[in-house]
Every structure is written in structure tokens, then in C-alpha cells.
Image (cartoon, grey):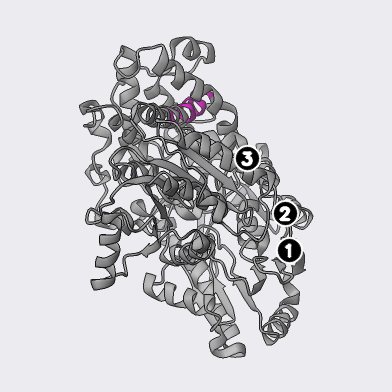
Amino acid sequence: MRPDILNPLFIEAATLDGVGPKMQKPLDKLGLSRVRDIAYHLPERFVTRRAVHNLDEASVGEQVVVALTPTQHKASSGRGPYRVLAQDEIGNICSITYFGRASYTAKKLLPVGEKRWIAGRIDQYGQMLQITHPDHVVADSADTLTRLCEPVYALSEGLTQPRISGLVAQALERLPELPEWIEKGQFNAEQWPDWRDALKLAHLGEHESARERLAYDELLANSLALLLVRADNRQRKGQPLIGDGHLRAKLELPYTLTGAQSRSVDEIEGDLAQDTPMLRLLQGDVGAGKTVVALKAMLIAAEAGKQAALLAPTEILARQHFETLRAMARPTGVEVALLTGRDKGKARESILMGLLDGSIDIVVGTHAIFQDSVAYRDLGLVVIDEQHRFGVAQRIMLTNKGKSTPHTLAMTATPIPRTLTLAQYGEMDVSRLDEMPPGRQPIDTRVVAQERLDDVVSAVERHIASGQQAYWVCPMVRENETEDIAAAEARYAGLKERFGDDVVLVHGQLKPELKDAAMERFAGGYAKVLVATTVIEVGVDVPSATLMIIEQAERFGLAQLHQLRGRVGRGSEKSVCLLVRGGALSETGRERLALMRETQDGFRLAEEDLRLRGGGELLGTRQSGDAPFRIATLEQITRLLPKAHDDAKILLERDGGLAGSRGEAARILLYLFERDWGVQMLRGG
């Protein structure tokens, strides 16, 4: 149960003054549904202004507060601006300019002949100084002069800076006094403010230490929750799975395993032989051969007389894994089955019976394989593909399916910098597939200017005429998914005019069955070009798709570009990736595209991505809605996470765990950051 002391923070935002149904929508869009969310909605930046006596003291481009007296209102004809001419105390004239509907407020706010204090940015228009859409216009100087340093918040349509500032102020009023969870020695050494002061200061100005402390809290909560999961796992009784090798010996692989694959299989085999359940992450670049490693692990389970289950995030991926595993495992004689939400009637019944009587050794499916109606004779191993799509809480649910806790092997194709592995997978041991199987052809990566789009379309035409397929990924439009979809729909319409039914479209807001149908037409070779936003499923395997086009590639992070490029180059044919760049290329954008041309090593790209981005989209997984941190920046994660991890260890090992006095405070921290699945790991927690 959440501690009562936190109740004021978890009340709905609708309880704040001024939040009606109309404001609820823009708040929800920003994820601000409770008082806690608003208190933690930290400013993106601060505007610092200087108070000046007259305009001679100000320079163009500067943010100032100055007293001006309106002398004349000038409305322009048509759609031009509305100007209010005003003078300072020594007679300098300045135009206060408004566009659109804002002119109505100008008439009210700036009566002729009455002095007003104006806060805004000084610009020059022709020979005249002007302030466009001032931030504040007030009759009393005291009010404006307190706002010399003012926060600027992220907004969504329907919200203004003053509205959000007002809500933040109300949320901060409701902050309770919470006990200190940071280890005393460290708290003093860092000279951090306490929690409540830190939150208030972080909204007031450039208070670095306040922001640091809040970031540290978030990292500590995460580390602690993951360590609790790990500790709980160590206390659970698993069953040692020791295989005699008779099934693995029957595998007829057309290649020998790479050193990295053999090493990972050995690490997994060692874990499975223990009576503590395995919790291991297998990290491997696209095409590094994770499936073979997973199959060997599942065969060890079968040799030990147990069943194994592979969980995939989507139906298409589940089907694909099923086909691959069934083909690979055929010589061994093990029974592989597929179970998805689509299976109904007799087919479903017979799979459920096979799982119950043990005649099915390996089952592949979506989370349907863990519904209550599905029972196993003896589940020994769970393999989770694309780990970041499943939260820790879901994973805990899966492990309650066996007679004893099954071993867990998680897999991800998202290469993660070493510093960040701890942040997402702090409770797991990690195996890395950091070499490519021989025979994989490198993907020819080229950068093309947007102006040559017609040439690109002609290239697609030649490409599909030769019987091959292509992906066309549309740009990410700022933060706006609807605009992303509009861009994709427009591109789809243009290509459809040229190629007819050979083109299909996939984006995040399509109904799942339509999305699946389009993907299946493409995977089956009936459609030749797949136009998509960035939702192209991680891992969709279409060997005859050998051309990848990414529009406005400079807008994507390196990790994401690398993931998208990995959709091609899966068959024996040579593959090409065209990065189409827009006109305005930043230095970082240029460096990103150069790195993409230079290397195909996902781990190196992940490290470079971290260096180039320093913030923003974490680990290239933001499209899965699972970036673990909202407050800590990448730079802070890299620097503070090892400290937080060590601190969490000290708390659990030396400071009496969650039972001691600091532990009580830490429990509050876990609930505050909604890492309460960590607390639930404790017996009766």
C-alpha cells in the first residue's frame, strides 16, 4: 500500500484551482494527470531579464523589464500586426506589437497615457525598437521585478506559461515533509537541499544542486527497485536444468557459432545448472545470432525434461520466431508450437492440452502464453524477446507460471552503452554478442540530399522491377505523432500513384489488425514497398527487402537509424540503405550521418550516440514508451548512476534493508517514483 504521507501528491490534477474539463486535455497530453506530475514538471529553461530605466540602457536582443507609457494604438488593415506606440521616461519611442487575436488584449492592457511595466525582448524593426508579444504587462513594478528570472515550461496546445506556472505553484504548496532517504555522509558531502526544498528551488532558477538531487532520487529509486528484484530472485527456489547434450548434438547448423555465441551459450548453461533462477540479458546487434543462442538454451531445458516458452512483443514477430525455431529444431524432434491471441476453438484447445500434458516442449507466442487459462506441465525456462517492451512488473508475473520459479533469458537487439545497461537492466547478468556471424554482407550506406528525391523514387522503381522489396521510413516530425502520420500518409499517397497496390502503409495509430494485414502482405511478398513511421517492428524479417530509405535521417538518433538499417541485409543479396538528408544540417546531424556510413557496429554507435546526444531520447527506445527516466539527463545518468547503485547496495546490505529507519524513507521513495513493484518483491511488502 502507498504510504499515506504521499496521498496529497497522488490526488488528481483536477483538484487544483482552475483545472476544468477543458484544461484536462492539454495536461493529459503532457502526462500531468496528478499533483505529483505537475510538481515534477521541471522548467526546460529560464528567461533572465534585466530591469532598465530607459531604452538607451537596453541592447537589441536583450530580455528586459522597462516602464513605458502608451501614446497611440495603430491597427493595420488586413492581417498585419496591431501596434501600440509607447515612450520611456526620457521620450524614446518603442512599438509594442501583437499579431492575430492577441490585439484584443492589447486594447485592455495598454490604455493610452497610463504607465505600464513591460517584460519582453527588445528587437529592432526598421528604425524603431519593438517588443513583440510581451511576456508581462502590469501596472505595478513590484510584480514584474520579481520575475527577473522566470521558468519556461514545456506546453501543449491550450496551455500558456502563466497557467502552468500557476498550477506548479499550487502543486508545490501541497508538498509534504518527507524523511531523508539519501545516505547521510553523501547528503552532507554533496551539500544537497532536502527533497521539498529541492523541488521548489528547481522551479526557481538555475539551481544545479537542486536538479542534481532530484535526478539522484530518481536513479536511486530505480537502482533500489532493480536490486530488490535481484535479491528476491536469489531467494527463490529454482530447479537446476542440466542437459546431457543429446538434443543439441542433433542440430544441423549450416555454420559454426561465433566466439561470442559460444561464450554466451556457456554462460547460460552455467546459470541454468544453479538452483537460483537465472536472470540474464542477451544483448546482440541485429543479425548477431541471438535466436540460435536462445534455441540452445531451450534445448537444454528440453534435455532436462522441462518446457520452454518464448515471448515476443507482437504477433508477427511471434510467428516469425516460430517458423525459424521450428525449421532449426526439426532434426532434434522437439515439438514447437505457436500460441497467439488469434488462436481459437479446437486448434487452441489442442495446444493447451499439449502444454498441460508436456507433449509440447517449446511454445512461442505473444503474452497470450501467460494468460490464466494456460497451464504448463513443467515450465523451466522463459525467453523474452525485445526485453524493453515488457516492464519488470510483467516479467515478475511470468515467472509465477512454473512449479518453481523458471529461469529467465531476456534478449534485446538495441545495443546499449555500458553505462546505461545498469540503468535498465541492473537486476540482470549480461551476455553480449559483439561479433557478427561470417557471411553477413555489410549494408551499403549512402547519404542523399532531399533535392534528389525523384532519383530515389526511380531507384525504387528499378529495385522492385528486379523482384526485390523496399522499406520507406518517413521523418519524425518534432514531438507530434499526428504530423508524423500526416507525413507518412502524404508519402504513401505519392508512391501509390506511381506503384499502385505494390505499396502498403503502417503507422502507430492503425488498428492492430490493419497493421498486421499490411505487414503480412509485405512479409509474404505481395506488396513491394512498405511506407512507415518509426513503428516498423523491431525484428521483422523479410529477406527479400534489400533497400531501406530513411527520409530526413538527420532527425533520428543514431541508435534508431541503426535499428532501422538493420531491417535490411537479412538475406544473401547485397543491401542498400539510403539516408535522405534535409537542407538544414546541424553539426551533430552531419556527424551522425557520417558515423552511419563509417560503421555497422551497434555497440560503437550506441556509445557515440550517448556522446552526441547527451540528453533527450534515451537508448533509442523512446518509441516503445519505456524510457526509464523523466528527470535525470543522460549526462546525469552516466555520472550519478554508479553512485546511486552503490548507495542502494549499502542500504540493502548494511543499513538494514527496508526495515531500518532509512529503509522506511526509501520505501516512500519507491512509491514516489512508482517503482513500487520493488517493494512488492519483499514478502508481504
Span of residues in magenta:
209-218
The spot of residue 25 in percent (x, y) is 32, 57
User: Which circle's residue, 1 or 2, is located before the other in the chain?
Assistant: 1
Query: For this rendering, which residue is in front, 20 or 297?
Result: 297
- What kind of element bears circle 2? loop
Image check: 565 left or right of 665? right
Q: Quadrant of the C terminus?
A: top left
Q: Which residue is mark 3?
A: 263
Instruction: Tell me the kind of residue under disc 1.
Output: Ile
Report the residue at 57% width, 43% height from top.
265
Instruction: Tell me the kind of residue under disc 2.
Output: Gln
Q: Are marks 2 and 3 in contact (CB under 8 Å)?
A: no
Instruction: Tell me the kind of residue under disc 3.
Output: Arg
CA distance for labels 2 and 3 = 22 Å
Query: For this rendering, which residue is in front, 502 or 533?
Result: 502
Question: Secondary structure of the magenta portion, mostly?
Answer: helix
Image check: 435 left or right of 209? right
Report the residue at 69% width, 80% height from top.
460
The spot of residue 546 in percent (x, y) is 67, 72
Q: Are marks 1 and 3 in contact (CB under 8 Å)?
A: no
Q: Which residue is mark 2?
A: 600
Report the residue at 33% width, 30% height from top.
236
Query: For this rendering, which residue is in front, 133 or 57?
Result: 133
Tell me if residue 99 comes above or below residue 272 in the rendering: below
Q: Which residue is mark 1?
A: 443
CA distance for labels 1 and 2 = 8 Å
Report the residue at 34% width, 64% height from top.
340
What is the quadrant of residue 66 in the picture? top right
Q: Quadrant of the N terminus?
A: top left
User: Which circle's residue, 2 or 3, is located before the other in the chain?
Assistant: 3
Query: For this rendering, which residue is in front, 388 or 591?
Result: 388
